[in-house]
Image (cartoon, rainbow, N blue to C red):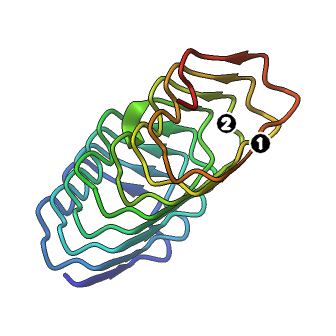
Amino acid sequence: VVNLSLENCKTIYNETLYQCSNLTTISLPVCEYVGNSAFQDCTSLTSINLPICTSIGSRAFYNCSSLSYVSLPICTSIGDRAFFRCGNIQTMVLGVYSLSNEFSGRSLLKEVYLSNCSYVGREAFYNCSLTNIVIPNSVTSIGEGAFYNCDSLTTIELPNSITNIGYSAFY
């Protein structure tokens, strides 16, 4: 499988395309759930656009080392290590409620677009190459070290809704 296009697929179960190293693109316009390790080790995968997906399982895209673009605009849940070892991600569109340190250490990550997020967690973007981020009005708290060592960050817009900023959040 090189290109996956399933117009009516709502669920991708655990390990469905595990280690499918030739897969480059995914088109799943009505997919709501991606299971654990569903695309793990799909090392040629470059782009993910899941416009109505609400939940991503643990290790779903683990070690998708060619992945550069991720769009999950209404996703509310991202499992542990879902994007671990995806070091080439440059742009992410996220709709999660709460971000953990899932994206820390992404040295190429330059752009992040958040919506519906209420909490940017501890070390969420630690050591990333972000240049610009707009924090939406839904965010009330930014965790400790959330943007620590993001030396390329030149512009950040903070809304009035923020009531707590953790230690070294922008150090």
Q: Position of residue 16 (x, y in %)?
A: 21, 58
Residues at discs 1 and 2 in contact (Cβ within 8 Å): yes
Label disc, if present, on residue 18 of the rendered structure: none
Q: Nearer the viewer, residue 52 or 83?
A: 83
Q: Secondary structure at mark 1?
A: loop
Q: Residue at x 73, y 31 (%)?
A: 139
Which residue lies under the disc numbered 1?
Answer: 136
Q: Quadrant of residue 26?
A: bottom left
- Chain-order first, disc 1 or disc 2: 2
Which residue lies under the disc numbered 2?
Answer: 117
Q: Residue furthest right?
A: 160
Spatial separation of the CA atoms under disc 1 and disc 2: 7 Å
Say few, some or many: other residues with alpha carbon within 10 Å of mark 1 (under 14 / 14 to 19 / 20 or more).
some
Q: Residue at x 28, y 56 (%)?
A: 86
Q: Nearer the viewer, residue 59 or 69?
A: 69
Left/right of residue 118 with respect to residue 146 in the rendered view: right
The amino acid marked with disc number 2 is Cys
Left/right of residue 161 with respect to residue 46 in the rendered view: right
